């Protein structure tokens, strides 16, 4: 369920090709009927 766009957290520049895309370290956390995607941008 997405309940709104929320507050902007950060702004990223556009990319021209997928090899310029960010690929943050991620962890998927099962919360019963929900899932949390924890992304590390450091």
Image (tube, grey):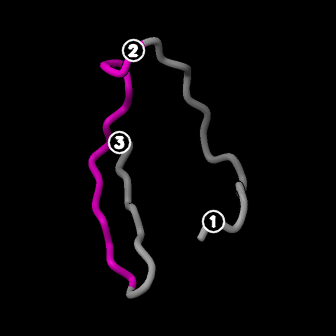
Instruction: Determine if the magenta segment contains residue 20.
Output: yes
Q: Is residue 7 above or below residue 35?
A: above
- Disc 2: CA contacts within 10 A as few (<14), some (14-19) or many (>=20): few
Q: Is residue 35 above or below residue 6?
A: below
Mark 1 or mark 2: name the one nearer the start of the chain: 1
Q: Nearer the viewer, mark 1 or mark 3?
A: 1
Q: Is residue 1 above or below residue 8?
A: below
Estimate the spatial distance between the alpha carbons at disc 1 and disc 2, rounded to whole Å: 28 Å
Helix, strand or loop for disc 2: loop
Percent coordinates x, y for residue 8 in the rendering:
68, 46
Q: Is residue 13 above or below residue 9?
A: above
Percent coordinates x, y for residue 11 in the rendering:
61, 33
Q: What residue is drawn where x is 46% and y is 12%?
A: 16
Residue at the spot of label 1: 2
Residue at the spot of label 3: 42
Viewer-nearest residue: 34 or 8: 34
Q: How many marks?
A: 3
Instruction: Determine if the magenta segment contains residue 22.
Output: yes
- Disc 3: CA contacts within 10 A as few (<14), some (14-19) or many (>=20): few
- On screen, residue 33 versus residue 25, left or right, reads right
Range of the magenta residues? 17-31
Residue at the spot of label 2: 17
Helix, strand or loop for disc 3: loop
- Disc 1: CA contacts within 10 A as few (<14), some (14-19) or many (>=20): few
Viewer-nearest residue: 37 or 1: 1
């Amino acid at each position: 369920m997405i309940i709104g766009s929320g507050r902007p957290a950060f702004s990223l520049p556009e990319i021209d090709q997928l090899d310029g895309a960010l690929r943050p370290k991620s962890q998927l956390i099962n919360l019963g009927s929900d899932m949390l995607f924890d992304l590390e941008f450091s």
